[in-house]
Image: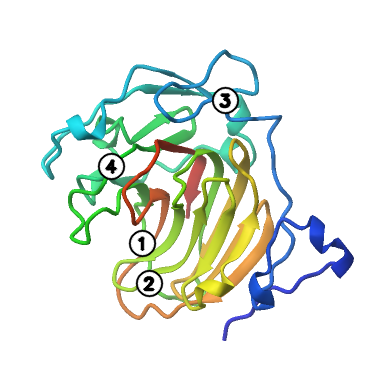
Amino acid sequence: MKTHIKKNIALSLMASLLVFNSCNKKESLPVPEYIPGQADGNGTGDGTGGSGTSSTTLYTETGTNPPYSTLKLTPKTASVDGSTINVNNALVEVGYGATPMSQNINIHTLTDTYISATDAPKFKRWWQVDGNTQIFRLFEGENSIIDKRGEHPRIEAFSGISWTYNPNVWHTFYAHYTLVKTDPKGVVIFQDKNSDNDWAFQLTTSSTGNVALDDRTLPASETIIVLRNMVGKSFDCKVRDNGKDWECYINDALVATGSFNRPTGNNKFRWGMYASHTQVVNSMIFVSGARFD
């Protein structure tokens, strides 16, 4: 049976919390907002890049990205080039982002559900690495060309390891997220994913940078906002999962626990950007130090 996390501060302090208790049905611990330096996200993710080299600039960009309408994509597309993002590594590779990322990963793009780590750099338009940071981008007008449901653009990385339910064996994911710019209709940035039973829970973000946790076993009214106004800002994320039970920590604070029965299939961690709609704007997030065990 699922245990919800209870509020631990007086009602008089509720206005200052970053955690939102939706309809007073789902409760969470307060989450401290983590802001490295005074990052303001001068880079817009729209192909123009950031300007200057001040410590508050998240990145600079060189090169261009052709409009999606001009690309001739097929499931056999071997590479898709794009501009180069030069991340302000000192600013975003802090917290969990300071630890080297796991190399045993694959990516899922608009054109292919499984691209090896060896071939992933060939799809620079959507995914690239600078230092210890993975850069995920989606562009205006983009849709998946392989999803039978239509639309559903995505650029995600996923763990090379997988597991089935064992109450005594937990797997852990660590990463430091920086939200540069995301689509106004929202985007998924993390999934605790099962190959047969879909996701147990997911993290999403809005165009204003509100980060929400969606528990699959609960109605949408019980989705909780764990961080607010995070555009241009960063936070640490840790997830533990044993194939049935899960825990989610934001900035080392436990924000939710849950249980989702997954009797078949394999479980993996997925991170990046995934949407159910055509992209309205160019979007970009950084995930630094993504690792798992």
Quadrant housing the N terminus: bottom right
Q: Nearer the viewer, residue 234 or 225?
A: 225
Residue 126 spot, x, y in % from top left: 33, 36
* Residue that label 4 marks: 142
Upstream in sequence: badge 3 or badge 1? 3
Label 4 amino acid?
A: Glu
Residue 213 spot, x, y in % from top left: 55, 63
Question: Neighbour class for label 4 at 10 Å: few (<14), some, many (≥20)?
Answer: many
Residue 240 spot, x, y in % from top left: 54, 63
Upstream in sequence: badge 4 or badge 3? 3
Label 2 amino acid?
A: Thr
Residue 279 spot, x, y in % from top left: 35, 45
Upstream in sequence: badge 3 or badge 2? 3
Label 3 amino acid?
A: Asn
Gap between marks 3 and 2 measured at Cα: 43 Å
Mark 3 or 1: in front is 3
* Residue that label 1 marks: 162
- Tag 3 and tag 1, C-beta contact below 8 Å: no
- Tag 1 and tag 4, C-beta contact below 8 Å: no
Gap between marks 4 and 2 measured at Cα: 34 Å
Q: Nearer the viewer, residue 271 or 182?
A: 182
Label 1 amino acid?
A: Ser
- What's the residue at 52%, 52% (across, down)? 205
Q: Nearer the viewer, residue 15 or 292?
A: 15
Question: Neighbour class for label 1 at 10 Å: few (<14), some, many (≥20)?
Answer: some
Q: Given the current orientation, which residue lies at the most extreme bottom position?
A: 1
* Residue that label 2 marks: 164
Mark 1 or 4: in front is 4
- What's the residue at 43%, 50% (across, down)? 271
* Residue that label 3 marks: 42
